[in-house]
Amino acid sequence: MERTAGSSAASERLRRRSNAPRASADGLFSASSMAAFLCLTASLILLPLVLPALPPPPLPLLLVPVGIIAVLLLLALMPSDVHDVAACL
């Protein structure tokens, strides 16, 4: 007798879940956020066509990301139980 009551309760829960309101595409973004996304998209498409090309950055500035990656790699591969960091380098 308990099995039928349990199974009917489970089927009732499944029925409630299937009838639950789903998030539609209309409710995800407000009108103002959609307008902001459209303006951002238009500026990303149109501004490179209008603005002049920039000169390349100097070489030392291009090496900054490489230095950051090298430091992060060094920190990632360093043992975590080191008491004296200077002795490890």
Image (cartoon, rainbow, N blue to C red):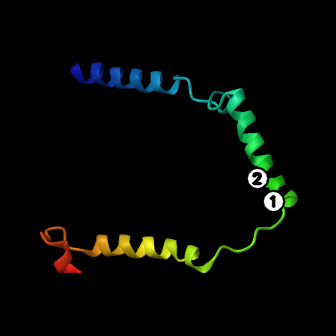
Q: Residue at x 51, y 72 (%)?
A: 64
The kind of residue tagged 1 is Pro
Would you name the residue on which mark 1 appears? 48
Q: Secondary structure at mark 2?
A: helix
Query: In the rendered picture of this protein, how many numbered marks are placed on residues?
Result: 2
| Mark 1 residue crowding within 10 angstroms, few (<14) / some (14–19) / many (20+) | few
Image coordinates of residue 54 in percent, x first then y, are 76, 68
Q: Examine the rendered structure and indicate whether residue 41 appears above or below residue 71.
A: above
Q: Examine the rendered structure and indicate whether residue 54 appears above or below residue 8.
A: below
| Mark 2 residue crowding within 10 angstroms, few (<14) / some (14–19) / many (20+) | few
Q: Examine the rendered structure and indicate whether residue 57 appears above or below residue 33.
A: below
Image coordinates of residue 87 in percent, x first then y, are 16, 79
Q: Residue 3's quadrant in the figure?
A: top left
Image coordinates of residue 69 in percent, x first then y, are 43, 72
| Residue most extreme to the right | 50
The kind of residue tagged 2 is Leu
Q: Where the C terminus falls, by quadrant?
A: bottom left
Q: Residue at x 34, y 20 (%)?
A: 9
Q: Secondary structure at mark 1?
A: helix
Would you name the residue on which mark 2 appears? 44
